[in-house]
Amino acid sequence: MKAELADEHRWLEQLTGRWRMTFDPPSGTGEQAPGEAWEEETRSLSGTWIVSESTGTMPGGAMATNILTLGYDPARKRYVGSFISSVMTNLWVYEGTLDDTGKVLTLDCEGPDFENPGRTARYQDIITIKDENTRNLSSRIQNADGTWKYVMSCDYKRI
C-alpha cells in the first residue's frame, strides 16, 4: 500500500530541517533566560508525515525533549498529529486545518487545564509560516466564556 500524497502533505515539507527556537514566555516580556536555547530537527517520513524532535532547557534548568508528529488525513480533510514531552504525562492529539492564505495551520487539541486540576480544556497550537526560513508557533487555551487566552509563542529560524 502506498499513500497518495496531496498538496497538504507537501505543505508539511517546509517544516523539515534544523531550527533554532526562541520563546516568548507567558509573561510577554520577550526575554529568554541565558541557557534556555532550544533546537529542533524535523524530518519527513517519505512525504506522508513529519517528525520533529526539539530539545532545550526549561525555566528552572531542567532539560526537556519534545516530539511532534504531523500528517494529513485526506479522508477527514484534516491535518492530524500528536505531541509528547519529557516534562508532561499527557499525550496531545491534534486535528486541524490550514487557513485560506496557506500560511497558518491551526491545530485543535484537548489537554489538562493547568489552572483547574482534574479538568480538561481546549487548546490551539498555531503554526504560522513567515517565509522559507522563519515560522512561529503560538499556543492558546479557551476560557470558560469561549474567549482565548495566550499561553506562549515561539519563533523558529532555520539553521
Image (cartoon, grey):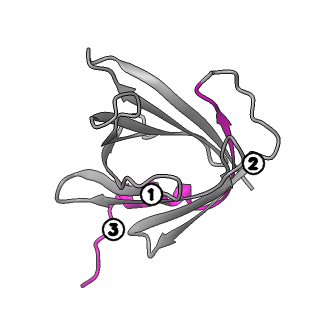
Residue 59 x/y as whole percent: 68, 40
- What residue is pinned by disc 1? 84
Q: Amino acid at mark 3?
A: Leu
The residue under label 2 is which amino acid type? Ala
Quarter of the N terminus within the rendering = bottom left
- Of helix, strand and loop, which one carries label 3? loop
- What residue appears at the point 74 percent right and 45 percent down from the top-left corner? 36
Which residue appears at 78% of the width and 36% of the height? 33
The 10 Å Cα crowd at callout 2, few under 14, some 14 to 19, many 20 or more, is some
Q: Is residue 118 left or right of residue 56?
A: left
Q: Whole-Å distance between the Cαs marked 1 and 2? A: 19 Å
Name the residue type under label 1: Ile
Q: Earlier in the sequence, mark 1 or mark 2?
A: 2
**Where residue 108 sits in the image (x, y, percent)?**
32, 40
Please check the rendered image and state whether residue 104 is part of the magenta-colored stretch, yes or no. Answer: no
Relative image position of residue 153 (x, y in whole percent) = 57, 33
In the displayed structure, would residue 137 be above or below residue 151?
A: below
Out of 90 and 142, give the one closest to the viewer: 90
Query: Which residue does the numbered mark 3 point to in the structure image?
Result: 5
Q: Earlier in the sequence, mark 3 or mark 2?
A: 3
Q: Vertically, is 149 above or below 154?
A: above
Q: CA distance from mark 3 to mark 1?
A: 26 Å
Q: Which residue is at a point 75% across and 48% down the rendered structure image?
A: 37
In magenta, the rendered stretch is 1-26
Q: Secondary structure at mark 2?
A: loop
Q: Marks 3 and 2, how far apart in space?
A: 35 Å
Q: Which mark is residue 37?
A: 2
